[in-house]
Structure formats: structure tokens, C-alpha cells
Image (cartoon, rainbow, N blue to C red):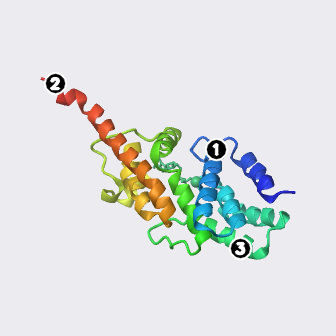
Amino acid sequence: MNKIVETEKWVQAKLAHDTTGHDWQHIDRVRRNAVLLYKKEGGNREVIELAALLHDVVDDKLVEDVEKAYEEVREWLKSQQVEEENCKHIVHILQTMSFKGGNRPAMATLEGQIVQDADRLDAIGAIGIARTFMYAGAKGTVLYDENIAVRSEMTEEEYRHGKSTAIAHFYEKLLKLTALMNTQTARSLAQERHTYMKEFLVQFKKEWNYHYENAD
Ligand code: ADP
Ligand code: NI
């Protein structure tokens, strides 16, 4: 019995019907990114790969009862004979990654830093652009509105009422991720994706304003 293969199947069954950008393909890309980072940065491969596979199973956007989801993950890891110490480490990584609010704690271990970087890499670049619009479509978010401020200029209340746009999400989050990478390997991989997103935004706004600029 292979823990990784069994966990793949378990996660795949759970996320099979997701259309908000947390589908199995996202998990698989994050796992591949994580393994690639592990090969450059080191760490405990089992912890890295299992945490990457499980990282969205406890997301409050996807499950109603987060505590129950964590309990299921603990039981699952135990059933796969994952050592207690590794199990605790994996759960700690998931908790830190999904931490909400301003004072998000820094990822304490190399394994956690790698999984977080791997997830962030999948949120930027061409894939990040595609996922943003898929998520916005699933949530009914507006594409773009020049009059809607980005999150940093909004009140918490406005944000909760969805007064954001898909394009604003780039400024609220995606363009900040490259500088937040934990590992040097991820930061250098992120560079090309970061530039590509900036070029996309320039082109988007150029086309958006084309009619105004070319009117008499
Ligand atoms: P992750 O799987 O990386 O933790 P999230 O759960 O934060 O990602 O979001 C899933 C995808 O949807 C990501 O690509 C993210 O950038 C995008 N996304 C999250 N919130 C918004 C939003 N308010 N508008 C548009 N896209 C969003
Ligand atoms: Ni993710």
C-alpha cells in the first residue's frame, strides 16, 4: 500500500466536482510544484507531498465543518500509517496555510514553506489568470469596473458584500505573491509568471479603453 497513491485517490474523490479552481488538477499541479521545490531545497518529501495533496481538503470555502475536515485528515493519515510526528506536522502546515486575517503566522518549517510556495505558484502566471476568472465566474463576481476600488481601499464591509472584481483580485493578492515567496527557488520561478500577469493587465486595460481613446 502506497500512502501517496492512496491519498491521491482519497483527495480526488473529495474534490471531483469542484469548479472554483480547487479541482484535482490544481492539487496535482501544487504537488508537482512542491516536489520540484523539494528537489532544489530539500526537506521531508513525505510530509511535503502529503501536505500538498491535502492542502485544500480543509479549506472553509470548500467544507462546511472545518473541524470535522481536520479530524478526517488526522484519521486518514493514521489509517495510512503516517508517523504521529509527521501527521502533526502536516496538520500544522494545513492550519497555517489556511489561516485567515491580517496576522497570518509565517510558515515555520521548510516543508511548510515549500507547500505554501507551490500553492502560490499555481495562483499566478497564465494558470493564475485562468483560475481567477474561473473562480469569479463560479462566484458571480464582476469582471472589471474602473469605479470599484481594490481591496486595500475598501472597508471590510464592502469587501464582504462582494464589491470587488476579478481584475481587482490581481492587485489585492496575486501581484503580491512573488515577493512573499519563502524559498529562493520559488521566487525565481515566480518571476516569469509575475511579468506575464503584469503584461496581461496592461493589455486588458488597453483593450478596455480602446474605444474611448479612438473616439473622435
Ligand atoms: P488557493 O487554492 O491557492 O488557496 P484560493 O482558495 O484563495 O486559492 O482561491 C482559488 C483560486 O481563486 C485562486 O486562483 C485565487 O487567486 C482565485 N480567487 C480567490 N479569491 C478570488 C476573488 N475574490 N476573485 C477572483 N479570484 C479569486
Ligand atoms: Ni490551493
The quadrant of the picture occupied by the C terminus is top left
Of pointers 2 and 3, the one earlier in the residue sequence? 3
Q: Give x and y (percent) for residue 192.
A: 42, 49
How packed mark 2 is, by other alpha carbons closer than 10 Å (few <14, some 14-19, many 20 or more), is: few
Which element type, helix, strand or loop, lies under badge 1? Answer: helix
> 16 or 28, which lies in front?
28
Name which residue type carries label 1.
Answer: Gln
Cα gap from disc 2 to disc 1, whole angstroms:
44 Å
How packed mark 3 is, by other alpha carbons closer than 10 Å (few <14, some 14-19, many 20 or more), is: some
Q: Residue at x 79, y 72 (%)?
A: 83
Q: Residue at x 71, y 73 (%)?
A: 88
Outermost residue toward the left?
216
Look at the numbered disc 1 and say if its residue's Cβ is closer than 8 Å to ligand 2.
Answer: no
Q: Give x and y (percent) for residue 92.
A: 64, 71
Q: Answer yes or no: is residue 165 visible.
A: no
Name which residue type carries label 2.
Answer: Ala
Residue hosting label 1: 25
Residue hosting label 2: 215
Of the residues tagged 2 and 1, which is closer to the observer?
A: 1
Q: Answer yes or no: is residue 207 visible.
A: yes
Cα gap from disc 3 to disc 1, whole angstroms:
26 Å
Outermost residue toward the front?
40
Residue hosting label 3: 88
Tags 2 and 1 touching, CB below 8 Å:
no
Q: Give x and y (percent) for residue 209.
A: 24, 33
Q: Residue at x 75, y 46 (%)?
A: 13
Which element type, helix, strand or loop, lies under badge 2? Answer: loop
> 68 or 102, which lies in front?
102
Image quarter for residue 37?
bottom right
Tags 3 and 1 touching, CB below 8 Å:
no
